[in-house]
Amino acid sequence: MERWVIVNPAAGRGKVGRLSGAILQAARKKGARAFLTEGPGHATELAQSAPEGARVVAVGGDGTVHEVLKGLAGTDKVLGVVPIGSGNDFARMLGLRGFPWPEALERALLAPEEAIDLGLVNGEPFGASLGVGFDALVAKKAFAAPPFLRGMPRYLYALFGVLKDLRLPEGRVWVDGEEVHRGPLLLLAAMNGPAYGGGIPIAPMADPRDGLLSVVLARAFTRPGVVLILPRLLLGRHLSHPQVVAYAGREVKVAFPHPVPAHADGELLPEAALYRAEVRPLGLKVVGGRAAARGAEPLLRPAGAS
């Protein structure tokens, strides 16, 4: 099996760039081909160039993973992740958070593979999350956040920046062909994983291996209402709110009278008035924490161990 490592030096607000020399060297010592991306879209091109059956490791955050995923979707290639980004929600979904990068790289290159569900929205693949409406506006605002803000602080900075111009569009939502909502809609989240926005547990019930998208709708909210639900949202206790409803299904459609922003894995999509999301059960091969945990031997031995 060929192993390719794709390193995005811009990820993690430049943190990956500072580590890139050491990462490239470590990857090549393990027999992998290692590449630095040169700009937006390059990670997708590299992933597409990898041979069938290759293991392709994305080094960066959710944006890097999303680009690599676009180059792997629909193939027999395996996605590995070294999470050194601002959000890392895809890695969180796979149980890969908290490892030092050398161990994360070792796991991504050598640990067993497993399968998770693959999401598609208007033909665009996604791994962990799809957000339509308010949270996509927040994602757009987050790109302009100060460089020292990462993860959840960055998300909250953007959220309060968007709140001052809050206007809810009228939306219609169908889950597996049944209309479940018609009226003002703050946001729709269709999730493979439990979190987006750097750890916001929007769908704590989501399972990336159940063949379903977990759908959360936030219906009519005022500005004060959004602020008041935030503490519950950060604790994953928002689903009991009367204006929040949850569903699960294989296909989700949401329609608006005019184009509304959306994001997939935190990356902004072309604005559209209609979004159709579906799931391909176990349609993506990954190196995740569950399969790695079943291995009989640790991947890295303590110093001095035989």
Image (tube, grey):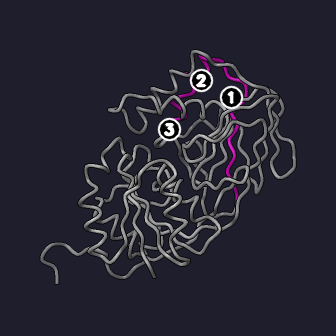
Q: Is residue 290 left or right of residue 216?
A: left
Contact between labelled residues 1 and 2, with CB atoms less than 8 Å apart: yes
Q: Residue at x 42, y 32 (%)?
A: 154
Contact between labelled residues 1 and 3, with CB atoms less than 8 Å apart: no
Using the rendered image of the protein, determine whether residue 289 is visible from the camera's viewpoint.
no
Of the residues tagged 2 and 1, which is closer to the observer? 1
Decide: few, some or many residues near mark 1? Use Cα within 10 Å; few <14, some 14-19, many ≥20: many
Query: Is residue 228 covered in magenta?
Result: yes
Query: In the current view of this chain or complex, which residue is farthest to the left?
Result: 304
Residue 297: assigned label: none
Span shown in magenta: 212-234
Q: Could you tell me how far apart the alpha carbons at marks 3 and 1 are, in whole angstroms?
A: 19 Å
Query: Is residue 231 covered in magenta?
Result: yes
Quarter residue 74 falls in: bottom right
Q: Residue at x 48, y 50 (%)?
A: 62
Identify which amino acid the numbered label 3 is placed on. Leu
Q: Circle 1 sits on which residue?
A: 186
Q: Is residue 117 left or right of residue 123?
A: left
- The tag earlier along the polypeptide, 3 or 1, is 1
Residue 134, given in percent of the width and then of the height, sits at 63, 30
Q: Is 224 drawn above or below residue 18 in the view shown?
A: above
Q: Could you tell me how far apart the alpha carbons at marks 3 and 2 are, in whole angstroms?
A: 15 Å
Residue 202, given in percent of the width and then of the height, sits at 58, 41
Q: Could you tell me how far apart the alpha carbons at marks 2 and 1 are, in whole angstroms?
A: 9 Å
Identify which amino acid the numbered label 2 is placed on. Val
Of the residues tagged 3 and 2, which is closer to the observer? 2
Decide: few, some or many residues near mark 3? Use Cα within 10 Å; few <14, some 14-19, many ≥20: few
Using the rendered image of the protein, determine whether residue 133 is visible from the camera's viewpoint.
yes
Q: Circle 3 sits on which residue?
A: 235
Q: Circle 2 sits on which residue?
A: 226
- The tag earlier along the polypeptide, 2 or 1, is 1
